[in-house]
Amino acid sequence: MKKLEGKVAIITGGSTGIGLATAQLFASEGAYVYITGRRQKELDTAVRLIGKNITGVQGDVANLADLDRLYATVKQHHDQIDILFANAGEGRYVPFGASTEADFDSMFNINVKGAFFTVQKALPLLQDGGSIILTASIGASKGQGGGSMNGASKAAVRSFARTWTVELSDRRIRVNAISPGPINTPMLNSMGETEEQTKQILAMIATTVPMRRLGDPDEVAKAVLFLASDDSSFVTGIELFVDGGVAQI
């Protein structure tokens, strides 16, 4: 039997990268998956790629009206949510001295406010005994140049996993955080101004990883599947690092 047979899953930021890889894996394991993304074209491409048991809902997690529309769409077709992967986030690195109020507001609105209300607004549909997975980051544990806003916002997400584990324990809802390291995603591949510069940056990043390579979105997706499924039935409140050892040394 498939690990998520008959389950309904929500994945925010599901049109590219880790979210898309997880949506593909969830669907292959029997779940009906709803994905969100801000860009309609990427969302449509993702839906076509997955092919079945998938619905795309365009929206921004920092916009509460968009979240209301997401859950209204789910309620029209399903009366429950079993798995919520609050994955949407922003990971830009900006030097401390050059950071603007707009930079700060953008990152905290998406990473913190977005995660908070994505989960809060799901609670009426979320089944007792369900699973919530939050995307944090090694940036919450490592001091990284230019990463003060990213690290602090992801530390807040890590804190949510702890507090919600306690607050939702009476409903047997498990809450865990996943913390990826350098993963070969479109976000990481946009770091350079040219293709050659990007290759050089990625090669340099790989040298900082004990496994001497970047991670693949599929490798993170498999960890998320573990936290979503009954394989992790006695696991809650944790931060699971999928980072090639970067934050462990």
Image (cartoon, helix red, strand yellow):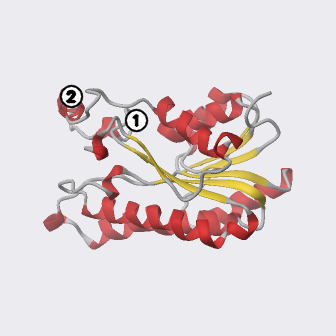
Q: What label sits on residue 203 in the rendered view?
A: 2
Residue toward you, 130 or 60: 130
Q: Quadrant of the C terminus?
A: top left
What residue sits 52% from the left and 46% below the top? 39
Q: Is residue 239 above or below residue 197?
A: below
Viewport quadrant of the N terminus: top right
- Crowd tier of the residue under label 1, counting other residues whose Cα lies within 10 Å: few below 14, some 14–19, many 20 or above: some
Quadrant of residue 139 in the image? bottom left
Query: Total label count?
Result: 2
Give the image quarter of residue 20: top right
Q: Secondary structure at mark 2?
A: helix
Instruction: Find residue 68 and report its horizontal and vertical position in percent.
Output: 69, 66
Q: Amino acid at mark 1?
A: Thr
Residue 114 in the image: above or below residue 136: below
The residue at 34%/34% (across/down) is 244
Circle nearer the N terminus (2, 1): 1
SS at badge 1 = loop
Image location of residue 46, percent across then percent down? 60, 34
In this rendered view, identify the residue nearer to me: 185 or 182. 182
- Residue toward you, 65 or 91: 91
**Which amino acid type is marked by label 2?**
Ala
Q: Which residue is mark 1?
A: 185
Residue 62 visible in the displayed image? no
Q: Position of residue 27 (x, y in %)?
A: 70, 33
Residue 239 in sight in this render: yes
Asked where in the image residue 55 lies, by quadrant, the reply is: top right
Q: Which mark is residue 120?
A: none
Q: CA distance from mark 2 to mark 1?
A: 14 Å
Left-right relation of 147 to 50: left
Residue 13, x across and y down, in percent: 54, 48
Q: Residue at x 55, y 68 (%)?
A: 116
Crowd tier of the residue under label 2, counting other residues whose Cα lies within 10 Å: few below 14, some 14–19, many 20 or above: some
